[in-house]
Image (tube, helix red, strand yellow):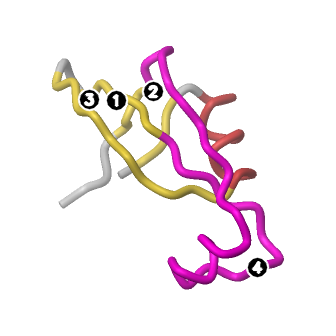
Amino acid sequence: MNPLEQYIEPDWKITRLSESQKVEYGFPADENWVIVDYKTNCYGNISKKHRPWLLSEWEEAIKRGYYME
């Protein structure tokens, strides 16, 4: 299956992970991880998402307006 463009809807909420949360999730402590609540639009299919992102990857996706999934 080919990856599709997931366009990020304008209304999203970002929460930084604390050091203890990073350990709980198993993420490296030296990286900036965030949890993002957001909606995507893929060919008219609107989906709610709640997932962790590296802050740099999220900022890049926001700048582009979409990410591939």
Disc 1 is placed on an element classified as strand
Q: Amino acid at mark 3?
A: Cys
Marks 1 and 4: which is nearer the front?
A: 4
Image position of 2 (left or right of 68): left
Quarter of the image for the N terminus: give it. bottom left
Q: Is residue 11 magenta?
A: yes
Disc 2 is placed on an element classified as strand
Q: Disc 2 designates what residue?
A: 8
Disc 4 is placed on an element classified as loop
Q: Amino acid at mark 4?
A: Ala
Q: Are marks 1 and 2 in contact (CB under 8 Å)?
A: yes
Q: Amino acid at mark 2?
A: Ile
Please state the horizontal and vertical placement of residue 52, each as a whole percent of the image. Answer: 51, 58
Q: Earlier in the sequence, mark 2 or mark 4?
A: 2
| Quadrant in the picture for residue 7 | top left
| Quadrant in the picture for residue 48 | top left
Q: Is residue 33 above or below residue 45?
A: below
Few, some or many C-alpha atoms within 10 Å of disc 1 (few <14, some 14-19, many ≥20)?
Answer: many
| Gap between marks 1 and 3 measured at Cα | 6 Å
Q: Is residue 10 above or below residue 50?
A: above
| Gap between marks 1 and 4 measured at Cα | 28 Å
Write down the region rendered in magenta.
8-36
Which circle marks residue 40 in the picture?
1
Q: Disc 4 designates what residue?
A: 29
Q: Residue at x 48, y 16 (%)?
A: 11
| Gap between marks 3 and 4 measured at Cα | 33 Å
Q: Residue at x 60, y 70 (%)?
A: 21
Q: Disc 3 designates what residue?
A: 42
| Gap between marks 1 and 2 measured at Cα | 5 Å
Few, some or many C-alpha atoms within 10 Å of disc 4 (few <14, some 14-19, many ≥20)?
Answer: some
